[in-house]
Image (cartoon, rainbow, N blue to C red):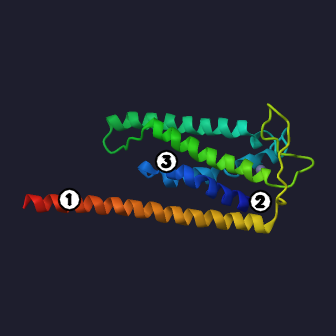
Amino acid sequence: MFPLGHVGMASLFVAPIALLLDRKRRYLPVVVLALATALLPDVDGKIPFSHHHGGPHTVLFALSASLVVGLALAFVSANVSWLARRIDGVPAFRPRAAFALGAGGALAGLGSHLFADILMIPVADNPVEPLWPASERAFALGLMTPGDPAWNWGLLAAGIGVQILVVAHVVSRIRGRVLAVQSGHSGDSNRSQ
Ligand SMILES: [Zn+2]
């Protein structure tokens, strides 16, 4: 699939994950991470001693890379939290939350890439073998060619549409919370008069 389609598919995949993690308004960083990792597996066609649809196009890579991204963010967050306890003005961010953010965002991006490539017609020389190294079985649903404009542009449009809906939902929730806090304050001040 072309980059446009991968960005669209990542935008679709990340919406439920980002909403699950949204309790502390982490929506934007999760989406950014998903989009940043959505094209990563295709580096395998550009590096030496590798071939397109190689190791980075596997479930094993998606899971282990997501784990690494989550642990890296947790490590940074642990150090920032250590600084936050000693220096005023440095914001604290719990390592557990940082891990969920990093692993969730990367898993959405990498998982969406693998899923999108499986939708394509079988690529004779470089089939997608998502279960490698456990199995060399090729997976190809044969629904599209890599450059199919309807699929690529359609997925991008669907991804942008879903993101607009989710952002509108998140903004309305935040506005609802702010209004609830403001009405609580005005209720307090009325009682104190
Ligand atoms: Zn790919």
| Dot 2 amino acid type | Phe
- Of the residues tagged 2 and 3, which is closer to the observer? 3
Q: Which residue is mark 3?
A: 21
Distance, label 3 to label 1, CA atoms, is 28 Å
Distance, label 2 to label 3, CA atoms, is 29 Å
Q: Which residue is mark 2?
A: 2
Residue 23's x, y, as percent? Answer: 43, 49
Q: Quadrant of the N terminus?
A: bottom right
Q: Secondary structure at mark 2?
A: loop
Residue 152's x, y, as percent? Answer: 75, 64
Q: Secondary structure at mark 3?
A: loop
Q: Is residue 27 left or right of residue 190?
A: right
Please report whichever mark, 2 or 3, sits nearer to the chain's N-terminal start. 2
| Dot 3 amino acid type | Leu
Residue at 44%, 34% in the rendered image: 79
Please report whichever mark, 3 or 1, sits nearer to the chain's N-terminal start. 3
Residue at 75%, 41% in the rendered image: 56
Instruction: Pick the residue in front: 71 or 161.
Output: 161
Q: Which residue is mark 1?
A: 185
Name above or below for residue 158 compared with residue 23.
below
Instruction: Bin the neighbour count of mark 2 within 10 Å (Cα to Cα): few under 14, some 14-19, many 20 and up.
Output: some
| Dot 1 amino acid type | His
In which quadrant of the rendered view does residue 70 lie? top right
Instruction: Pick the residue in front: 67 or 84.
Output: 67
Instruction: Bin the neighbour count of mark 3 within 10 Å (Cα to Cα): few under 14, some 14-19, many 20 and up.
Output: some
Q: Is residue 103 left or right of residue 80?
A: right
Total residue callouts: 3
Name above or below for residue 30 compared with residue 166.
above
Please report whichever mark, 2 or 1, sits nearer to the chain's N-terminal start. 2
Distance, label 2 to label 1, CA atoms, is 52 Å
Residue 192's x, y, as percent? Answer: 9, 58
